[in-house]
Image (tube, rainbow, N blue to C red):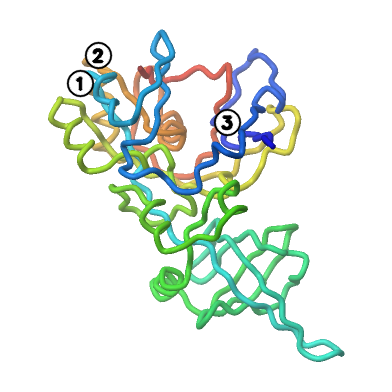
């Protein structure tokens, strides 16, 4: 049976006078047989739908045919951490020690030793509970519905190393419901240009690029630059309001370097097309735009929410 998918990442900010949209406008039926539980290999063999005056079925390997010299691809170079941790909560009761299996997805770092996380099942947790993940331990500091704040027994790089050793890649919910993460996912859900650690989910559009495709694009004079947006909790959480205008996006940390801003501005001035690869890169460069046709270096948190009616500041092809 097909099931309805409501797209949580409808990307951006409302424009005054824009047409009203409800959640039903973004519903579509996804037959279960079309849900790929593994990405295709090689990466550029993935199917690609091109809307360029007409609708064309293609593959990612065909991308150079739709670009031209002087175009600029903007990639998100965030690096995904293995943010899914499986552990146990032990609690002494009048009937003895009670043990519950707990799974958490880290979603936002608060300090050197503290993370906000989504816990499952959260109903079995309360402040003061200790969750042990192999040799790593954490204490529940706060609980708000399915979200918990965890203080770990390690901090800084020591905590990072422990998470890297025991964590699993956070799979998209529609895949995680059908299989568990494994060692292959550590490669499949990381881009080939990942550099800046901090994302708790992959910037999925960028996953389709490999070194061979990047080399072909470069040889054809198609330019590229990198920005950083750490994909956060918004990827996991559904849109629950019927009126899209009432939806509040989770903020995500990002940075547009002076080098990236200069490349984008130069491309716009010389008539090239600025093409963000995926919604994360799009959200970030629109956040950093200072006016129509110009961007500036930027760093900080963005909760921009792009939906139909949004007027883009950076004119893209």
Within-10-Å neighbours for mark 1: few <14, some 14–19, many 20+: some
Vertical order, 52 against 71 (above or below): above
Q: Which mark is residue 289?
A: none
Within-10-Å neighbours for mark 2: few <14, some 14–19, many 20+: few
Q: Earlier in the sequence, mark 1 or mark 2?
A: 1
Q: Which mark is residue 10?
A: 3
Query: Where residue 301 appears, x then y in whole percent?
Result: 49, 44
| Residue at x 58% of width, y 70% of height | 86
* SS state under label 1: loop
Q: Earlier in the sequence, mark 3 or mark 1?
A: 3
Q: Nearer the viewer, residue 162 or 37?
A: 37
Query: Where residue 265 appears, x then y in whole percent?
Result: 27, 24
Instruction: Judge from the rendering whether residue 237 lies leftward or rightward of residue 284; answer left or right.
Output: right
Disc 1 from disc 2: Cα separation: 8 Å
Vertical order, 218 against 97 (above or below): above
Q: Is residue 28 visible?
A: yes
Within-10-Å neighbours for mark 3: few <14, some 14–19, many 20+: some
Instruction: Judge from the rendering whether residue 196 lies leftward or rightward of residue 144; answer left or right.
Output: left
| Furthest-left residue in this view | 219
| Residue at x 71% of width, y 31% of height | 246
| Furthest-top residue in this view | 53
Name the residue tied to disc 1.
70
Query: Where residue 23 appears, x then y in whole percent?
Result: 70, 28
Q: Quadrant of the N terminus?
A: top right
Q: Are marks 1 and 2 in contact (CB under 8 Å)?
A: yes
Disc 3 from disc 1: Cα separation: 29 Å
Name the residue tied to disc 2.
271
* SS state under label 2: loop
Q: Is residue 256 visible?
A: no
Q: Earlier in the sequence, mark 2 or mark 3?
A: 3
- Quadrant hosting residue 132: bottom right
């Amino acid at each position: 049976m097909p099931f309805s998918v409501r797209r949580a990442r409808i990307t951006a900010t409302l424009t005054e006078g824009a047409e009203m949209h409800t959640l039903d406008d973004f519903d579509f039926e996804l037959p279960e047989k079309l849900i790929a539980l593994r990405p295709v290999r090689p990466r550029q063999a993935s199917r690609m739908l091109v809307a360029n005056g007409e609708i064309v079925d293609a593959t990612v390997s065909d991308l150079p045919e739709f670009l031209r010299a002087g175009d600029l691809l903007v990639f998100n170079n965030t690096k995904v951490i293995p943010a899914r941790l499986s552990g146990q909560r032990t609690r002494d009761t009048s009937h003895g020690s009670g043990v519950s299996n707990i799974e958490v997805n880290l979603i936002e770092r608060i300090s050197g030793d503290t993370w906000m996380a989504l816990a499952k099942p959260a109903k079995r947790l309360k402040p003061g509970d200790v969750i042990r993940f192999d040799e790593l331990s954490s204490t529940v500091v706060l609980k708000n519905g399915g979200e918990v704040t965890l203080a770990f027994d390690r901090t800084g790089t020591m905590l990072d190393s422990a998470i890297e050793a025991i964590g699993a890649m956070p799979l998209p919910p529609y895949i995680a419901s059908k299989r568990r993460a494994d060692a292959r996912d550590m490669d499949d859900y990381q881009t080939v240009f990942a550099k800046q650690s901090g994302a708790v989910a992959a910037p999925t559009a960028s996953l389709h690029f490999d070194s061979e495709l990047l080399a072909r694009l470069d040889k054809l004079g198609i330019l590229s630059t990198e920005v950083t947006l750490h994909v956060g909790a918004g990827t996991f959480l559904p849109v629950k309001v019927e009126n899209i205008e009432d939806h509040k996006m989770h903020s995500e940390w990002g940075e547009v370097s002076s080098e990236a801003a200069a490349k984008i501005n130069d491309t716009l001035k010389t008539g090239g097309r600025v093409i963000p690869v995926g919604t994360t890169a799009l959200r970030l460069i629109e956040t950093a735009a200072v006016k129509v046709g110009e961007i500036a270096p930027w760093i900080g948190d963005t909760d921009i929410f792009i939906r139909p009616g949004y007027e883009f500041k950076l004119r893209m092809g």
